[in-house]
Amino acid sequence: MVRNAVIEAIAKVTDIGEATHDGAGTRLRLGTEACVRLFVSTPSRPKATSSDTHIATLIMEETEGLSPDQVQTLQTAVRRIPFTTTEMKALRGQMPLTGELPAFLPPGTLSSLAPVLTVHHMTDFLVMVESVLAMGVPAQAITVLDKGYPYQHTDRVDAHLTRQGIAVWPWTNATDALDDHTRRAAALGLRGLLIDDGGYTLPVLLAQRPDLLPHFIGLVEQTISGITRLEPWEGRLPLPIFSVAESRLKATVECYGIADAAVRNLLRLLPEEKLEGRPALVVGFGRIGEHIADVLRSRRMRVAVHDRQLVRLIAAHERGYLTNRCLSTLLRDHRPLLVIGCTGRTGLRGEHAAAIGRNCYLVSTTSRNREFAVAELEEEARLVTDEGVLGTRLHLPSGVQVTLVGDGFPINFHHAESLPNMYSDLILASLLVAASTLAAPDHGFIAGHNVEASNRVLESCGLLERYYARFGPEATR
């Protein structure tokens, strides 16, 4: 099955003239001169991987007649293998709330909608999309925006969606994607719905294509970062917003998981660093920031906190963290090894570079790379170097080296799956409950933010009961 999937992927990008099988794998003739050899094997250490794991290896035996771009395309094709039935079965088992949601809601509850999904391209997203299809949405009515993060399985997720007939666009082409989506939805007689994680769609419609707004019934937003991006239109938002981002459900369950995942992924990228006893600075003491600070303190780091909101700064002080209203003062006097940005907006700018007095790592937990003013910081550097998977290193005139881990993009998604699927299950199921709510003609939501109404729906829909039954004191597994 795996071998056939790889060969099928290669055949989509080039003509296969001949395929021969021998004890050394499968030899594929490409065109008249080039050939590659494909091996599919089990891991050398089976107990170090999950059962039924296979490794596909493609060796370029002869590239005569192939351009460097064609070689790259072949290698990419191997990475774009859709998920197998065995893998999908395992994913559904990890996400019962999302996967079984169609059985708990009225049949066809989303059948009047054409959703635009801008959700992280991790394996949990595939179960969510399956449920969207099961809730009555035809594949041709779905548009997915790929946020472009270097997730662990992003190529395979995209390939899986494409095989289902779903339109996948890069987030950088959001305007064209929304225009194309509106035309397809209109041809099917469906209304659009935005399901977003980070403010990728409604701000684009408001700023660039307000003529398309009447084709959409509302927005479901998953992150505070996305809510923040709507601030320029506060008081004049034309669509109802179901805010999973600001809900008590999300704050209660997800925030610690994100903080823990961020620190775990950072440790994976910095295996030689010793954290115990060393200084860290958390910028932003909101829902994520307070948990990041707790996790770092549990790692025996000396943690300082900065927040522009005085009430949050006082909260951090009352919990025993070193605080100061001036970010530059904390950078200069605390001399942090780690600076973790959790503000949801740009918190550390070029003007702060002069206060950094030691080699350190800047780490973001915010959507995109907006947590740090990257361009401003690079202007302050005498040299910028590429450090591969770790990120970008800024060599300041003082001799200090500042590493933008993951190039300033969120650490918990950097070549990782971030949260375990059992964490994200409740949140993705909440997004679909929100979508089904806005699909009802009498939903009662008004244009703009509906935080309390969102809370009422999420806390009365039965998801929390099912979650507690699974992970509470009477859980059976």
Image: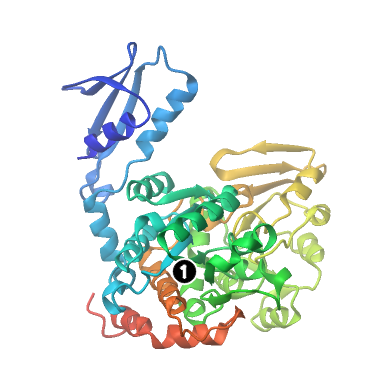
Q: Examine the image and state in which quarter residue 240 appears.
A: bottom right
Name the residue: 44% across, 71% down. Answer: 431
Q: Is 123 situated above or below 162? A: below
Quadrant assignment for the C terminus? bottom left
Q: Nearer the viewer, residue 394 or 230?
A: 230
| Residue 382 in the image, given as x and y percentages of width and height | 80, 38
Q: Is residue 170 shown to the viewer in this render?
A: yes
Number of marks present in the image shown: 1
Q: Is 68 situated above or below 333? A: above
- Left/right placement of residue 247 relative to residue 344 reads left
The color scheme shown is rainbow
| Residue 453 in the image, given as x and y percentages of width and height | 52, 86
Q: Is 361 situated above or below 244? A: above
User: For the residue carrying disc 1, how many other residues have a C-alpha within 10 Å: few (<14), some (14-19), or many (20+)?
Assistant: some
Name the residue: 33% across, 16% down. Answer: 31
- The kind of residue tagged 1 is Gly
Name the residue: 43% across, 50% down. Answer: 167
Name the residue: 38% across, 38% down. Answer: 79
- Left/right placement of residue 18 relative to residue 70 reads left
Q: Is residue 306 shown to the viewer in this render?
A: no
Of helix, strand and loop, which one carries label 1? Answer: helix
Residue at the disc numbered 1: 257
Q: Is 403 situated above or below 74? A: below
Q: Nearer the viewer, residue 381 or 172?
A: 172
